[in-house]
Amino acid sequence: MNGKSLSYFFLVLGVGALLFAFIEEGGAVMSLLAPTALIIIVGGTIAATGLSFPLDELRVLPGALKASFNFTRKSLAHQIIYFKDVSAKTRAEGLLAFDKELEKITDPFLKKGLRMVVDGFDSSAVRTILEQDLELAGARHKVGAEILESAGGYSPTMGVVGTVMGLINVLSRLDDPGRLGGAIAMAFIATLYGVAFANLWWLPLGAKMRAAHKQEVYEKQFIIEAVLLIQEGANTFLLIETLKGFLEREERVLFDKLNEKKA
């Protein structure tokens, strides 16, 4: 199951758990449907969040959100095997011999790094340019996470606003006691929507974006070190031992198995 599918799974699990508990208590799902409350919560939250950030930062959100949903953690153990092969090839045939292989690389960050190495950039320039790319990506993800977390803060407040508006409507109908129960219930649904959206959508998405960014930074730092080691012409043992420092225990075990097969 990839990261995107897992996100949908947990979202469905969270909503499903709430609905299941509500039904078990004798509630009717249809009684939770309140289009006006939904308009207040979603519209009010988006409006408040939009007012909190400049347009240039708001434009970052769709791309950052898409990237975090589509983010898939890479196997660094397999990456070390790949860099080991690249290092052996470039040490035996020279960096220019790797030029044709660049077209096969699908990772833009890795491709850019190796392209600069093949083109003869010095190591300090390669590191500086790649780290700048990493910082810019980090800034975009940070802004995206802040926008989502702000929405998570506004959503419950908008729920209270919706409830107060509903209660005002209730108080205007005191001459019709038969309808008061349903009207009060509908008023409190706004609070439910506000809290539910905050804790099952906005805040988790913000946390997910931060987590994806943290892992992406880690992987790109790994790539930067690998590219520089290849540029230096480091021997295979030094390259492997340096890059193994990025691996967690399970990945170290996997790498040892992969390396034994390649030997």
Image (spheres, helix red, strand yellow):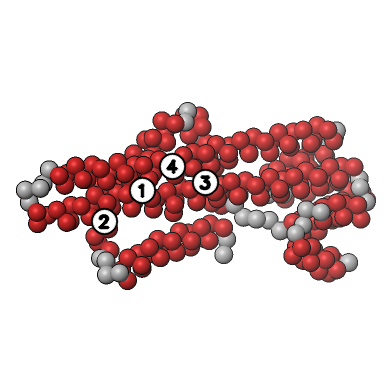
Estimate the x, y position of residue 174 in percent, counting from the top left: 10, 48
**Image point 25% across, 65% down: which residue?**
28
**Mark 2 or 1, which is nearer the eye?**
1
> Rounded to the nearest whole Å, what is the CA distance between mark 3 and mark 2?
26 Å
Residue 257 quadrant: bottom right
> Rounded to the nearest whole Å, what is the CA distance between mark 1 and mark 4?
10 Å
Three-letter amino acid code at disc 3?
Answer: Gly
Residue under pointer 3: 206
In this picture, residue 109 sits left or right of residue 4: right
Three-letter amino acid code at disc 2?
Answer: Leu
> Rounded to the nearest whole Å, what is the CA distance between mark 4 and mark 2?
23 Å
Q: Earlier in the sequence, mark 3 or mark 4?
A: 4
**Mark 3 or 4, which is nearer the eye?**
4
> Rounded to the nearest whole Å, what is the CA distance between mark 1 and mark 3?
16 Å
Residue under pointer 4: 153
Circle 3: is it few (<14), some (14-19), or many (20+) Cα within 10 Å? many
Residue under pointer 1: 194
Tag 3 and tag 4, C-beta contact below 8 Å: no
Q: Secondary structure at mark 2?
A: loop
Q: Earlier in the sequence, mark 3 or mark 2?
A: 2
**Mark 1 or 3, which is nearer the eye?**
1
> Rounded to the nearest whole Å, what is the CA distance between mark 3 and mark 4?
11 Å
